[in-house]
Amino acid sequence: MGTYDDPVTFASSPREFRVGSRVYVPRLKKYFVMEDSCASCISEWRRNHRWHVDMWVGGEGGDMASVLA
């Protein structure tokens, strides 16, 4: 749902965020919780401490305009 009590999942490097960390994204008006890692997130963090977060914002087949709406 994206509420504080029912956040949407996001992936990152465990060195950026601890599993279970919650973040709020004002543009999307949703909370996200760190529940997974992603290879490119880990690689970017190791290489140059660049923040990289992958957020789940919808199902397959959606388009960017629908996601942002």
Image (cartoon, rainbow, N blue to C red):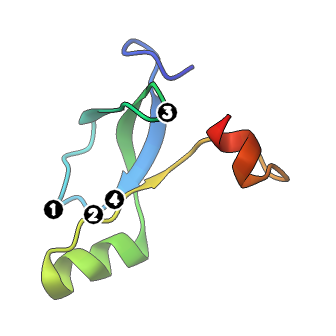
Q: Look at label 2 and name its amino acid.
A: Ser
Which residue occupies 75% across, 41% down? 66
- Where does the N terminus fall, quadrant-wise? top right
Mark 2 and mark 3 lie on one chain; the one further toward the N terminus is: 2
* Local crowd size for mark 3, using a 10 Å CA cut-off: few (<14), some (14–19), many (≥20): few
Which residue occupies 24% across, 36% down? 21
Horizontal side of residue 22 vs 2, given as left or right: left
The answer to the question of whether label 2 and label 3 lie on touching residues, with beta carbons closer than 8 A, is no
Q: Which mark is residue 12?
A: 4
The residues tagged by marks 4 and 1 sit, at their Cα atoms, a distance apart of: 8 Å
Q: Look at label 1 and name its amino acid.
A: Arg
- Where does the C terminus fall, quadrant-wise? top right
Q: Which of the two discs, 3 and 1, sits closer to the camera?
A: 3
Q: Look at label 3 and name its amino acid.
A: Leu
Q: Which of the two discs, 3 and 4, sits closer to the camera?
A: 3
Horizontal side of residue 45 vs 25, given as left or right: left
The residues tagged by marks 1 and 2 sit, at their Cα atoms, a distance apart of: 5 Å
Q: Which mark is residue 13?
A: 2
Residue nearest the observer in this picture, 35 or 10: 10
Q: Look at label 4 and name its amino acid.
A: Ser
